[in-house]
Amino acid sequence: MFRNYHRSGLTLTVVAVVQFMVSLDLSVVNVGLPQLAAGLGFSATGVTWVIHAYALTFGGLLLLGGKAGDRYGRKRMLLAGLALFGLASLAGGFAQEPGHLVAARAAQGIGAAALAPAALSLLATTFPGGRARVRAFGVWSAMNAAGGALGVLIGGVLTQYASWRWVMFVNVPMAAVAFALAWRGVASDLPAVRRGRPDVLGGVLATVGMTMLVFGVVRTDRHGWASPTTAITLAVAVVLLAAFVLVERTTRREPLVRLGLFANRSVSGANAFNLLVGAAMASAFYFMSLYLQRVLDIGPALTGVMFLPFALGVVAGSVLAVKLGYRFAPRNLLIGGALLTASGFAWFGLISPDGAFVTDVLGPSILASVGFGLCLGPLVATATTDVEPHETGTASGLLNSSRQLGASLGLAALGTAAQRHTGDTLTSETLNTGYARGLTLCAVLLLAAVLVAVAFLRRTGDQPAASAA
């Protein structure tokens, strides 16, 4: 019994480190983009591919990564993903040309697509129910949130006082520690019997279709939503994804995603909720970082420090979710947390060109971050409820995919709306107007997420998260 407890603790530690690393990597680069562009000679538009290369491979390969973990073993995929992620981070830190860094970021995305669903499915299968599951997902959600928020702080400090290269190097020791812990502490789970030959065609269609979807969205900064380039790209993505659904319905091989999985209201509702929350959170981080640096004229290091209350608030919300999880159903925590986060974003929407930290940043940060923390653990627990053990990797891949797609779609759509509201004249006042509009729309997305939770997640039979098995 002690051995099982010890192994469960090691698994939780590995998953926590992995999630912190992946979340940190999504935000640590953002603050250092101006210095990175100057150091390697990126053009003003070319530097955005440092972000997009990661989003394309990560978002496009998540379903395939989740399925590979189910079929070939989660530990095996976790180790492979960690090795690739660490090596790509090291190569990116030594990049000498723009193409080198973009290639390294793409490789990071491939590694993250392998390790993220494997880590999450390991957590779901190691802690199948009860109080241990609530605590485990509370730790996961705290590390997820802390990595995303602290990434801004760490990126700002490293960029200002060391070098932009350290926003890549910082991942290497974390990947090495996680690899060593996973090698020794995570039990091998290679399936004894494989269910059938894998659906290679479905995997190709899903991967290329999702990649085209993300590609079409992220390029809207150069080609508008109504442009022929965007329309053709998105149309091709829709055709490929429709073909994927058709293949999954008719294939005699083992499907990449069993379509019946979407009949599980917990799975479908959690992913729709996650897509909207991901869109709002990615956009809010982007707008607030630009507001602090371009409107209030604050340096990157101090900007990172000002995000620290948000990070601490998310951790506090995650801890509170664990305690409330013993009394309330996950659905209720999702609704309450989303409403609290929407209130914080609505407050953010009141920013002014001569704003102050306490009123324009600190106050709304506390509301939004605590609410977000309340959502994270219950969301993952909901998305893997009543899912067969051999499909937890697929369910985890779906959840990661919906977040990544939501972040790409939301940032592109809300960024376009903010830019149009800003106009052609760039002053502190016009920039503030655009960012305020974008942050207000983030609040609207959170209200839409509340409606999804009310409509899709079941009310009858709701149990406190600690007793739901």
Image: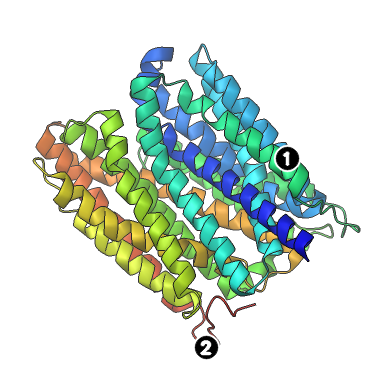
Q: Can you tell which mark lies on residue 460?
A: 2
Q: In the rendered view, does 122 fall on the left or right side of 104?
A: right
Q: Residue at x 56, y 44 (%)?
A: 59
Above or below for 61 versus 129: above
Q: Residue furthest front?
A: 2
Which corner quadrant of the image does residue 291 belong to?
A: top left
- Give whichever of discs 2 and 1 has the lower sequence position: 1
Q: Quarter of the image containing the C terminus?
A: bottom right
Residue in the foreground of this view, choosing between 62 and 206: 62
Residue 455, image x and y in percent? Answer: 44, 78
Amino acid tagged 2: Thr
Mark in the foreground, 2 or 1:
1
Residue 151, image x and y in percent? Answer: 42, 38
Residue in the foreground of this view, choosing between 88 and 464: 464
- The residue at which mark 1 appears reads as 79
Residue 231, image x and y in percent? Answer: 45, 43
Q: Residue at x 63, y 57 (%)?
A: 396
Q: Residue furthest right?
A: 193
Q: Residue at x 49, y 84 (%)?
A: 459
**Residue 452 is at least partly visible in this image:** no
Residue 13, image x and y in percent? Answer: 62, 50
Q: Residue at x 33, y 41 (%)?
A: 286
Decide: few, some or many residues near mark 2? Use Cα within 10 Å; few <14, some 14-19, many ≥20: few
Is disc 1 placed on a helix, strand or loop? helix
